[in-house]
Image (cartoon, grey):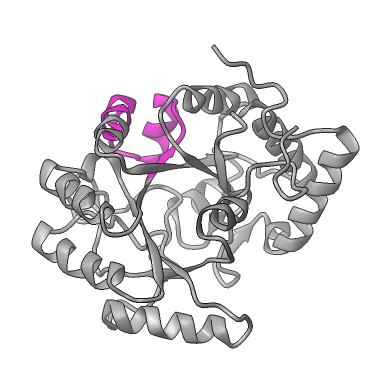
Amino acid sequence: MKNWNDKPYHSFDYMLKERFHGKVYKVALNGGMTCPNRDGTLGNRGCIFCSAGGSGDFAGNRQDGITEQIEKQIASIRKKRNADRFIAYFQAYTNTYAPVEYLRKIYTEAISHPNVVAVSIGTRPDCLGEEVLDLLEELNHIKPVWVELGLQSIHEKTARYIRRGYPLSCFNTAVKNLRERNLEVIVHTILGLPYETKEDILATMEYLNHMDIQGIKLQLLHVLKGTDLAEDYLAGKFQVYSMEEYLDLLIDCLEHLSPDMVIHRLTGDGPKELLLAPLWSSAKRTVLNTLHQECKARNSYQGKQYKED
């Protein structure tokens, strides 16, 4: 077992301290974009689990400029912590889904902020044209630029159910294009999607082990009020995990993942005013503490069952 500051997995926090020699915090930004799943290009209702905030429920106010959003969030964080280094995280909706001239403006504004040490951009694999890729590569020479891709699952049946809107081959091409430009890739997955088995989820982990990606987010499925997923949940079409079930699955996922993979998320936050289920997930600290206790009791750690080819 590797030593990740006594955690049983290769945490994002550990990676940041190794790379930047101290604590780094994220500020979540809203670049004022939409999504092809919402503007009529692919659909108008978004992915089945997506709230009106478009995965940016914790992002800044889109009415504010990028610098203003950064400054407001820095001020908020500094009320509780002595913080001076931050990641500018473009979170809301699809953050490469705009003319490249506009993207250059907002990305440059973020990357130029003296307290920003890296930029992370959440987007879709089908929204990474050549001009956007060239821009990201250019900015990556100034400060690190990471691209977060919403995959959720490798299974096409699941992709159709959640209305993802692109095939797995599109994801593969996006990763290849990003890595050719030396851009780091973080992949979003969701654990607990309706009708997926434990074997289906572990197959996604195994698949990603063989992709040239640098990080992963393991997101617990949240059912949020007002979503199409909530309608299916309230109709009794599927059940959500108990905390015990989720932690069992999460430990299995960690054991199968490469020990080099950086774990950016282990559960996730659902806005309390929107969260329909599972309600236990709002106690994030309890969930993580229980995970660490369970890993210790089982002598479990990331990569325990990982086999290199």
Relative to residue 44, is residue 207 depicted above or below? Answer: above
Q: How many marks?
A: 0
Does 16 sit left or right of 251 as displayed? left
Q: Nearer the viewer, residue 82 or 297?
A: 82
Residue drawn 85% across the image and 33% down it? 299
Q: Residue furthest top?
A: 309
Does 212 sit left or right of 41 as displayed? right
Where, quadrant-wise, is the N terminus in this rendering?
Answer: top right
Residue drawn 37% across the image and 32% down it? 160
Residue 195 pos. (x, y %): 56, 30
Residue 20 pos. (x, y %): 51, 59
Q: Nearer the viewer, residue 163 or 226?
A: 163
| Quadrant housing residue 158 | top left
* Magenta region: 149-174
Residue 261 pos. (x, y %): 55, 36
| Quadrant housing residue 66 | bottom left
Where, quadrant-wise, is the C terminus in this rendering?
Answer: top right
Relative to residue 118, is residue 301 depicted above or below? Answer: above
Q: Residue furthest right?
A: 297
Residue drawn 35% across the image and 54% down it? 144
Q: Nearer the viewer, residue 74 or 285?
A: 74
Q: Residue furthest front?
A: 21
Does 7 sit left or right of 307 as displayed? right
Q: Is residue 173 magenta?
A: yes
